[in-house]
Amino acid sequence: DTEVTQTPKHLVMGMTNKKSLKCEQHMGHRAMYWYKQKAKKPPELMFVYSYEKLSINESVPSRFSPECPNSSLLNLHLHALQPEDSALYLCASSLRGRFSTDTQYFGPGTRLTVL
Amino acid sequence: DQQVKQNSPSLSVQEGRISILNCDYTNSMFDYFLWYKKYPAEGPTFLISISSIKDKNEDGRFTVFLNKSAKHLSLHIVPSQPGDSAVYFCAASALIQGAQKLVFGQGTRLTINP
């Protein structure tokens, strides 16, 4: 089983709203990732969590705030977003945490529209 | 600066023939390479991977070849089937600050014609 789940599937929010994206995996994976994908572009890494600690932040604006409450759950808190932040947000996980390369398994994504 | 390049935005192949998708990379720190298949508005689905210590990996109809000296990899699909029609992304992995970073190519849209 290589399932990563993401909720909600679709989200529409105004620029003053606060919302959160949720990602879950129950495969015992120790690394979790957030990616952003714009139309007709490849996924771009935003954040990496390894053993529930933030390991990589790809200079993402502070209006995106990640959180990893436990090893199975990853959240992305959104506040004061801009219309250009509209995109498909993908979560991924991989088995090993630090100092190893591994296959990343992706969730279905959350389609975010900022009005 | 694109570290991973897929120079063919699209490829059209007859059903039953071989599909060959290509990918080039520039960073010697990449040590693990993956191919993903993606449908619109869905997450990428893992297909096959290869470590930099190998030059070939096979899984059913899918084979990935790696030429480290040329910094080039390719995905072969034999025989091609209509269900293979999708966008294929090549991804390269490196360890940054102890954590894995994946860099994706721009993707190649594969269309299998009946």
Image (cartoon, coloured by chain):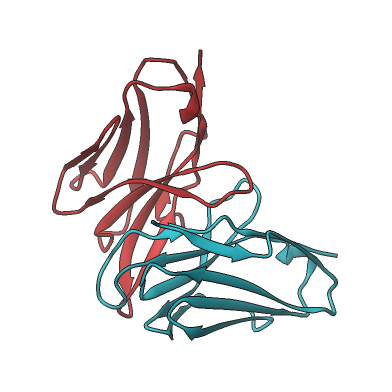
Chain colours: A cyan, B red
Residue A60 in sight: no
Q: Is residue A11 above or below residue A81?
A: above
* Image coords of residue B49 (percent x, y): 29, 49
Number of numbered tags placed on the structure image: 0
Considering depth in this image, is A70 or B109 the residue closer to the camera? A70
Tell me the residue at 45%/48% (across/down).
B45
Residue A54 rendering spot, x and y as whole percentages: 45, 84
Residue A80: image quadrant is bottom right
The answer to whether residue B34 of the structure is visible from this angle is yes
Instruction: Estimate the x, y position of residue A82 in percent, counting from the top left.
Output: 78, 71
- Residue sitting nearer the eye, B84 or B76: B84
Between A28 and A82, the residue placed more toward the observer is A28
Which quarter of the figure has residue B24? top left
Q: Tell me: residue B91, above or below residue B107.
A: below
Residue A67 rendering spot, x and y as whole percentages = 55, 84
Q: Nearer the viewer, residue B88 or A73?
A: A73
Q: Is residue B13 left or right of residue B73?
A: right
Which residue lies at the image location 19% right of the left edge and 54% below the top edge? Answer: B52
Which residue lies at the image location 16% right of the left edge and 43% below the top edge? B55
Seen at 51% across and 83% down, the residue is: A68
Q: Is residue A29 left or right of residue A23?
A: left
